[in-house]
Image: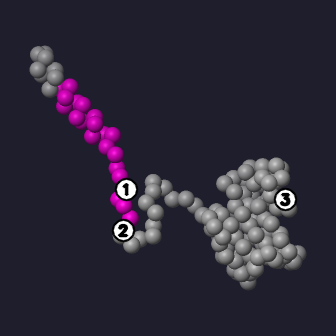
Amino acid sequence: MSSAKLAAVASLAAISLAGCGAIHVKPAAQTGSSAAVSRGRVNDPRTSPSDHIQCLRQKHLEVRKVGTTGLQIGAAPYGPYVRFTPTPGAAQANQIAGRDPGAEVIGSALVFPQRASDQMLKEVEDCIAHGVSG
């Protein structure tokens, strides 16, 4: 095979292979949209795997989201506060290291009882424990 034909075949092969690795870019969010443009979606720990907020509201407890990982049940500083960590191990590490004194670990959640009644705390614990294994 002549060098001209070899160069043509090699060029054609290179062009064909380059098309296989094409980058697909996700389009930007619509103007006026509050949706973030990203490669993935971050799960809100307060609503997955089971909806903790819905459970608390079904028990007629006032609950509001605080920041990106917290829940305030009832009025602060009286009602319990819940903060979710990335993993159950992270929650346990915080407790063992003494970074969150007084917190109870339930899965990846740290439950701070504050001044809640025993009955309210039991209802909060039951809802936060939904979807927790082990």
> Viewer-nearest of labels 2 and 3?
3
**Residue 63, image x, y percentages:** 70, 77
Label whose residue precedes the other's in the sequence (3 or 1):
1
| Residue bearing the label numbered 3 | 101
- Which dot, 3 or 1, sits closer to the camera? 3
Looking at the image, is 4 positioned above or below residue 33?
Answer: above
Instruction: Look at 76% across and 80% down and name the residue there.
Output: 75
Q: 45 and 67: which one is in front?
A: 67
Q: Tell me the CA gap for discs 3 and 1.
A: 44 Å
Residue 132, placed above or below residue 90? below
> Which dot marks residue 30?
2
Q: Which mark is residue 26?
A: 1
Q: Does the magenta-highlighted stretch encompass residue 25?
A: yes
Q: Is residue 130 left or right of residue 26?
A: right
- Label 1 neighbour load within 10 Å: few <14, some 14-19, many 20+: few
> Which residues make up the magenta segment?
9-30
